[in-house]
Image (spheres, coloured by chain):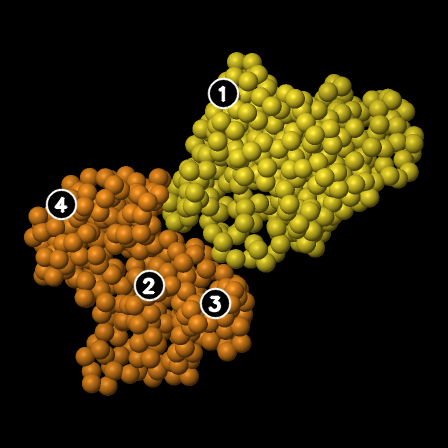
Amino acid sequence: MSLVCRNGRRDSLTIRARLVDSGGGLDVEGTVTIEDGIVTGVEQGHAAPASLVLAPAFVDPHVHLRTPGREDEETIASGTAAAAAGGYCAIVAMPNTEPVVDTASVLQSLRERAREEAIVPTGFTAAISKGQRGEELTEMAELASAGALAFTDDGRPVASARLMRRALAYSAVADRPLALHCEEPTLTRGGHMHEGSVSAELGLGGWPSVAETVMVERDLALAGYEGRPVHLQHLSARGSVDAVRRARLNGVAVSAEASPHHLCATDESIRSLDANLKMNPPLRTEDDRRALVEGLVDGTIDCIGTDHAPHARHEKDVPFEEAPFGVIGLETAFAALHTHLVREGEVALAIVLERMSAGPARALGLPVPRIAVGEPANLVLLDLDAEWTVREDRFRSRSANSWLLGRTLVGAVVKTIADGRVVYDA
Amino acid sequence: MSTEARRHLLGIADLSRVDVERMLDTARALERTLDREMKKLPALRGRLVVNLFYESSTRTLASFELAAKRLSADTMTLRSSGSSVDKGESLRDTALTLGAYDPDVVVVRHPQIGAAKLVASSTDAHVVNAGDGKHQHPTQALLDLFTIREALGRLDGVSVAIVGDVLHSRVARSLVEALRLVGAEPVLVGPPTLLPRGIEEMGCAATTSMDAVADVEVVYVLRMQSERMQPGAAFVPSLREYTALYGVTPERVRPGQVVMHPGPMNRGVEIDPRVADSGASLVTTQVRSGLVVRMAVLYDLLTAPGLHVAAPALEVA
């Protein structure tokens, strides 16, 4: 088992709600009984409070825990507390830490720390290239046996096509997928936001959508050639969604991720010059956003990943161009998607829930959370009518660089059960 | 400080057409005082204007300093070199520190977009953006409007070709917005690599053809920055080719057209010296306009009764 968390007593409880598990074709009012962390009863037909939904808990394929190195921004304890509050029963941490997770010893020490601190089961990825410098491969086989879930140079692209090809071929030995941050770096140099009419007006350096799409096309071509699976991280552009759709038809094993912010917001919002709207890849146009939503609905985008990227307050409280890329997302993901996509009628609730849970679990080879007798309880209880305002002092994360600060959202996590333990109870 | 929302001039978007016309009328009234022997007016006596300059500047800094002094305000200039900025102080902290002196106006020039806005959010002073990166330079646009209005007698319907490196130009961005606000018709002209994608959504035409210059009343030449031509940043193959294609030469200027340039000029690159020194050139008028328009802006922010008031706030006997 490559997920780790601290030990604790497994809980027994009964929950009455609308049960939604599209994997099991379930959408009924009923009662779920949990004994010592295992689902022992799923009974249909009991009237439940109208706004409460019980669903398989969420899995986040893309989280930055900033540990080791920037524990002032996030720790395993604070990041997993944030995940618990967001309804997650599993998260996957990125390796772009200080130092980079590129050796088994760094990975092992992280997993040991997670066994003491992690409130929610946590998986770790390792880098594709040593130091994420894009020059030499890491020791993937040893890293895989030390528990690496996947390999990624997330935060930066693998610029060299030659190294990417080698990584794809060699990843067969480790039997783990590659998770790819697709960005052609020569096209994004000096870029701070999506290149388009808003960047033209503001004068901010443009980060064109084609910089992502050409890399998506390259990596899909290489993955097809090497016959290896790839997971594409945080897609943002229409052209990238189209490329994934075509590649799947051609038999490439590809999973694709989009973030709540790319699914809900556009570059228009950057007119405020709020550095909490600065992320990599950048917020794009309404047309790109629609393409991501269409992809989410038809399954081209099979995962939602938050790309939770904590940054210290003083690092974001600077002019836009000076600010680092990234926003936090674990604690607002469901509410943002429910408010902007489900309530607006763009995406059905069951699809959002599936893409936040079974989709990412399958993409990274993790157990798929289910509402079924005999399964460990990995469940989230949601109140679809609860309204709340995103405030800096409400975050369990150590950082508060949210693009949603001050906004009122509809839909809240009431309870999270991860691996049989109640890890969050509002 | 009053409890009303403080007025700032961070970009042209802060102004209505009425505001612009009021400021230009104030500037015209002030211009008459320039020919007096005693040039100083008591209007802002006891007020403090701080110039916070993180970028080198000659005419903008000089004209803000002189504008404040001519209105009898106290002035203080802080530059990034030789200050605590050198020691790594953040812009927010510098603004908070300055706030302790209770300035009435802080004039900010900074290489990064949104810097003036950030200062405005951390002081009680009125903030004037004197250039934030490639974003906005609103007092430059106002002085250009003033210059055009004095030269042509009107702004409504005036056609203006803005020629050159639009991509890196805060002057172009502010000027397009300002011209649109007063009913003039801007057209952007430049090589395809220096015209930002989507710029026409600001409400102007954009073309790569210098033919567009023949049809306008005002030819506004942008500075071509040589640092744009360094290896790795080659937006055009050479300055020589740029000048051949887009240089404003006597052959490209028709009788009756006026030529403007925000300075500093690269003579022989974007503008031919024969044009720069010709009767068609308004370049020195622009500098003189810069002083009175900045006086008018400082005066307006500190004394105008509020937004959208048509009458000039200042009566100069």
Which residue bears the numbered disc 1?
A221
Mark 1 vs mark 4: in front: 1
Are labels 1 and 2 assigned to the same chain?
A: no
Q: Amino acid at mark 1?
A: Ala
Residue B268, quarter of the rendered image: bottom left
Rounded to the nearest whole Å, what is the CA distance between mark 4 and mark 2? 28 Å
- Which of disc 4 and disc 3 is earlier in sequence? 3
Asked whether residue B158 appears in the rendered view, the answer is no
- Residue A404: percent from the left, percent from the top? 61, 47
Q: CA distance from mark 1 to mark 2?
A: 52 Å
Q: Earlier in the sequence, mark 3 or mark 2?
A: 3
Q: CA distance from mark 1 to mark 4?
A: 50 Å
The location of residue B272, given as percent across then percent down, is: 14, 54
Q: Colour of chain A?
A: yellow
Q: Residues within 10 Å of mark 4 (few under 14, many from 20)?
A: some
Amino acid, disc 3: Asp
The residue marked by circle 4 belongs to what chain?
A: B
Image coordinates of residue B137 in percent, x first then y, are 35, 59
Q: Label 4 amino acid? A: Ala
Q: Name the residue carrying label 2.
A: B139
- In the depicted view, which residue is nearer to us: A217 or A235? A217
| Tag 4 residue | B214
Q: CA distance from mark 3 to mark 2?
A: 27 Å
Q: Secondary structure at mark 3?
A: helix
Q: Which one is closest to the eye, mark 3 or mark 2?
A: 3
Residue B86's disc is: 3
From the rendered image, report the letter of the chain displayed in orange.
Answer: B
